[in-house]
Structure formats: structure tokens, C-alpha cells
Amino acid sequence: MAKSKNNAKKLSYISVPSQIINSISSSSLQSLLDSPKKSSRNTNNNRFFIFFTNSTSTIIFRKQRLWFFTLFLFGFLGMLKFGLTLHTPFPPYPCATTTLLPQNMISTTPHSKSNLGAVLRENNDQKKDEVLLSHVELRAQGLEKMEGDERVEKSEFWEKPDGLGYKPCLSFSRDYRRASEGVLKDRRKYLMVVVSGGLNQQRNQIVDAVVIARILGAALVVPILQVNVIWGDESEFGDIFDLEHFKRVLANDVRVVSALPSTHLMTKPVEGSPPLHVTPSWIRSRYLRRFNREGVLLLRSLDSRLSKDLPSDLQKLRCKVAFNALRFAQPIQELGDSIAERMQSKGPYLALHLRMEKDVWVRTGCLPGLSPEFDEIVNNERIQRPELLTARSSMTYHERKMAGLCPLNAVEVTRLLKGLGAPKNARIYWAGGQPLGGKEALLPLIQEFPHFYSKEDLALPGELQPFANKASIMAAIDYIVSEKSDVFMPSHGGNMGHAIQGHRAFAGHKKYITPNKRHMLPYFHNSSLPEEEFNRIMKELHQDSLGQPELRTIKAGRDVTKFPIPECMCNDSNAQS
């Protein structure tokens, strides 16, 4: 190919740091820019003329090599000056925001080490207020250098429990596989379900909806997510979960359709809401005859309606839905993975699910322990809305607390983690809603474990914006980051903690700390107990509560999605075919 004539006049550019340019006087800079034009009579002369003048002489460099040598010399001297007098201008994170805070907002006192929260001090004689500063703002100030290249120290705290060789085992029986052909061919019966609650309540109900569809031999219409009155999230199934993946994984178990076919649109559905813990035989006897006649069954309020004790194949189906089919939608999964990778960038990390929201304190009949003012707020809310109290009302707050029925507050979580040997430089991701009292309620944790982050702290500017006011999607991001952590600990039980416990077991029994609240709290109130003795007792109390394999059959009624052994996992000693 012929070369363009323009190539003959191709210009070359040399990148020069701004610090070097600034170090050159304006007159010298102008002399560099005002290079003389080539004369038409000197078109074959490839020389550059640079003039540097002073009071005594004018030196003319006529040779190109000298010009480049001079430029190199200026560059070297400038870079030398730059290296000796300035701090590195590049933030530790290239993508960090560059928005700066007012200078008088930044504390330069040496005690501030947190990347999520730093203690800001007002100048002059003003009262000292402790304010939490977000991690993104700290990155903008370059303060993340305080963490530097420090790696999380090695500790037995990060060690996984012995999984005893258990691995996922979802082999269905021959009878189940034989029956699948008839279930998948049926075009007469369609099950519709409306699921309620938060994200993890909805997950549980979707799992049961698939199992009920299988019991009835019906196709499952994509579940309808009821708008939650507390969070107001209007997300649909496909906004949160990967619908095509859901259909594909369950293709040999239950037929999943996006909507009712035209032949059933005018059908008046049979409606129902089963009582608690019903069996497959109850479901068939209650619904199957009318279902066969009408063709459409609509079920609501499925939370804990289906028995936890099912035949082995249906238990395996439960696990298949919970751990394989219910994958989050791609944008959510990718963002959750990115945030988890940022947490993993300097070693292992701990995920905490902190149940410190106002509604949790109200529902459990417990008090946050922040101050009398916050206790009064919780008590007043409980008086005004007594229907929110789900705990046993006959028990006093102290009785609930000592029975292990209350969430741990930040002080208690901090003492437990220290007692279990968490290193001070442990990186902690906290999941959960805004705690009562704001982020200041987390100060005991932040002061002891300064590398303390939430998704808002780790997300880059604008990353969370598409999911604003979407509580279920925000909870899904917390779920992903928590599930991928090296260690997970909830401050209280609940749907998310139970779901992650089963998920981490299914993934190879990753460490999961279950606080032994009933037995450990008396030691929290013993001020005469030496710290070393307290730590020894905490480790002893929790030596069997670290996520080790636990058989579901030990206690009847346990959900297989929380305790997947023996139905959904097997080792060489109980391998199932």
C-alpha cells in the first residue's frame, strides 16, 4: 500500500511532566514554543535552532543531538527536583474520586487510622465531635496511604474448619427422574405464587414454590414479588435473579414459564394459603382435584408453609433451587464480585451481618444499649405498634438478653471478635441496614478494627446509583460479598444468616461463626475476668460453632438449605447414587 504524503510531515511529541514545565521560567518556555519556521531556502537542512540568552553570551545549538541532550538534561533535573520535594501525586487507587473536602474538615492527628471512618476534630475551642468519614472521601484525600501495603496478618482466626470431605451431592433417584417426563409434558396446570418479605424471605418462598409445583406436577409461572410495605422495593423477579439461568437449571425438574398461556388467561384461579409446615400429601389432597379442574392455582404467604421434613428427592430439589438456580442477575452479580475482589485485594476478610436496625430492636423486644434516649425511641415504637413485637412478650428485656435472643451490639461484637483472635488489622465488611444511631453506633468496632467497610465505602462513584431505593438489590450485593468472605459472622439469627450458613456449607464449609450468646454473655458482665482468661473462654465456647459439618438429622425440622447434610452433601462414607 502506498504511504500517504502526509506521513512525510509527521510530527513527533515528547511528553514532559507538568512539574518540569513549571520549573522552567516563562521566558524559557516561550523560547521553546517559538521555534523559528523553516526557510524555503533551507528545506534540506534538518537542524533546530534553540536560543538561550543571558547578559553575556548567546549559545546556538545547531545539531539535533545536542538539542535532545539538552532536553534530557532539563528533564532529569526536573524529575530529580520532583522526586526530592514532592510526595507521589498518584493515589493508591487509580479510580479514586478526586473530589476534595474542605481543608478545615481534615484532621491531621496521628490517631486517625480508619479508612471508612476517621475522627475529625474541629479547630479552635469548638467542642470535639467524632464524625464518621466515608471511605471514598478518604480515598479522595489520599489518606488510604495510612493502610499502605500492609497485608492482613496471618492468624488461626482465618483457618477453615475441617469439612470432613463433604461435597455437593444432588443425584436424584430413578423414580424421580422417571416421573420428570410426565411433569414436564403437562400443559394443563399452572402454579402462580406471590412471595413477600425481604430478599431472603422471598428466596425461601421461591424455593418452596418450586417444590410445590413439583409435588402438584404443575408448571411454575415466574413468582410475583410483593412490594414490601417497609422497604417499598418494586423490583420484579428478573430484576434481582437471572431468570434464564433459573429456567435452564430447573429444566429437568419443573417447567418454568414467564406468563400464563392464552388458553388460561380467562380462568378463575383456585386461591389458597396453606397453614404452617404442611406435608406433600396434605397439598395434594387439598388442591389437586380443583387444580386439575380449573388449571390455575394461586398461592400466597408461603413463608414456612411447607414442611422442612420432606422426602429425599424433594430435599435435593430444595438445595438445587437455593444453591444453583437462584443466581443473581448479571449486573448485581458483577458488582458484588467487584466489591468482593476489592476486599480480597490485601488478603482475607471477615463479613459481619449486623442486625442493629431500628425495626430489629423493636421486633425482638431488645434495646440497643446506646443511650437512654435511643432506648426510649425503641420502647415508644413498640408501644405505638405492638404488632411489630414478634418476640415472647412475657419476657423482660434482660431475660431475653441473657437467653441469647437479642442481637449483639457493636461493643459486644468487638469483644467477641477480639476474644476469638481476630487480628487488629483484619479487614471487615459489614452488611446490613443503617443501624439505629447511625454509623456512630459502630464506633467501638471501627476504633478496634479500623479497616472497616460497607458497600457504600467500596463502590466507585456512581456504581450503586442504578440500584438506589432498591432494598432487595442492595441486600443481594451484601449477600454476594458475605458469601465470598473468608469468615462470616452474624450478630443475630435471621433469614440472611441462615441462607449464607447453608450456602457456605455447600461451598465447602467455609468458616461461619455462630455467636454462642446464651453462654458467653455472663462473661461479658464479669469485669474482674482477666482479658487472657476471657479470650480463652470465648475460643472454648465457640470451638464447635465455626461452620463445621453438621447433620440436619440431629434436630427434626431443620431446613435443608441451612443444614445440607446428609441430603444434599455426601462424603466417601455416605456417597449416594
Image: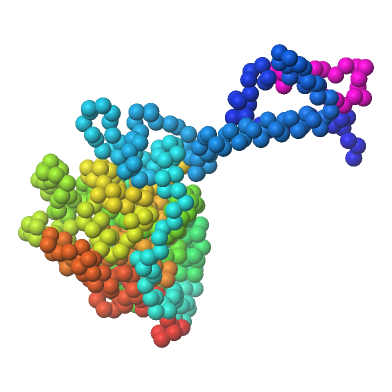
Q: Residue 3 location in percent, x, y?
A: 88, 35
Q: How many marks?
A: 0
Start and end of the magenta stretch?
Answer: 30-48
Residue 47 covered by magenta stretch: yes
Q: Please name the predominant secondary structure of the magenta segment in the image.
A: loop
Picture quarter containing residue 30? top right
Q: How is the image coloured?
A: rainbow
Residue 521 covered by magenta stretch: no
Residue found at x 41% / y 58%: 152
Residue found at x 63% / y 20%: 25
Residue found at x 34% / y 31%: 105
Residue reaching furthest to the bottom: 573
Picture quarter containing residue 494? bottom left
In-front residue for pair 197/397: 397
Residue found at x 21% / y 31%: 127
Asked whether residue 495 appears in the rendered view, the answer is no
Q: Residue 62 location in percent, x, y?
A: 84, 24
Q: Residue 311 location in percent, x, y?
A: 34, 77
Picture quarter containing residue 293? bottom left
Q: Residue 374 location in percent, x, y?
A: 15, 43
Rendered position, 342 above or below 47: below
Please give left or right for residue 482 compared with residue 257 in the image.
Answer: left
In-front residue for pair 324/219: 324
Please give left or right for residue 165 compared with residue 298 in the image.
Answer: right
Asked whether residue 109 appears in the rendered view, the answer is yes
